[in-house]
Image (cartoon, rainbow, N blue to C red):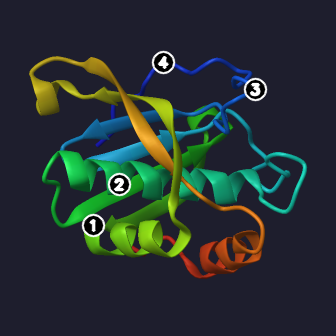
Amino acid sequence: MSPTRVQPQASQPLTSSTALPMELGFDEGFGSIVVPESDTTASAYGGRLRRYDVHIAKMFEVTHFMCQQENLTPGLTWNYAAGGGRINMGSFEITCRLANQIASAYGLGKSEPTNVTFSAGEVGRPAVRSFNIPILDITGDKVPRWVSFVQGFQPVRR
């Protein structure tokens, strides 16, 4: 199953935003995140967080938001691809319970406009919807904790 993808966000995030370019989609209970870069180990913002860490954070942020807004249960399985979709990074299962635990542990910061494409199966026809989704507060002493968490958060084996 190939999730419908959102149109790429601007290649340069707004200076007030922490967004990296990515495409997010939902299709039949699955989420997809497709990022343009092939090297997800590069620093996201010049610090310790890698792009990979930020992509995983985005999956948690969107899952948490959707669980709160859409009565999504038990959670989402995310299909993650880099290199514009050429590199399969794996599938990640994020339950609403785990997303809530992470949101509580790290806290939520400012909201960030996030576009998600819903497949025809989800809404009758493909549609892009924009949500203001609070981002995880992964700053200061929380950065090494997040990096450590992400290293242990492995893709599911199917």
Looking at the rendered structure, which numbered label has been put on residue 96?
1
Q: Dividing the image into 4 quarters, which one contains the N terminus?
A: top left
**In front: label 4 or label 2:** 2
Which numbered dot is residue 11? none
Tell me what residue is drawn at x 78 percent, y 59 percent. 49
**Rendered location of residue 92, percent (x, y):** 43, 64
Q: In the visual, does 16 lie left or right of 89?
A: right
Mark in the foreground, 4 or 1: 1
98 vs 127, nearest the viewer: 98
Contact between labelled residues 3 and 2, with CB atoms less than 8 Å apart: no
Q: Is residue 124 left or right of residue 67?
A: left
Please tell me whether mark 1 sits on a helix, a strand or a loop.
Answer: helix
| Distance (Cα) linking label 2 and label 3 | 25 Å
Q: Quadrant of residue 73?
A: bottom left
Q: Seen in the image, is 12 located left or right of residue 46? A: left
User: Which sits earlier in the primary sequence, circle 2 or circle 3?
Assistant: 3
Q: Are marks 4 and 2 in contact (CB under 8 Å)?
A: no
Q: Position of residue 9 (x, y in %)?
A: 57, 21
Label 1 vs label 3: CA separation? 30 Å
- Residue at 26% in and 18% down: 127
Q: What residue type is disc 2 on?
A: Thr
Q: Quadrant of residue 121?
A: top left
Q: CA distance from mark 4 to mark 2?
A: 20 Å
Whether tag 2 and tag 1 are in contact, CB under 8 A, the answer is yes
- The residues bearing labels 2 and 1 have C-alpha atoms spaced at a distance of 7 Å
Disc number for residue 15: 3
Please name the residue that numbered disc 2 is placed on. 63
**Mark found first going from the N terminus, 4 or 3:** 4
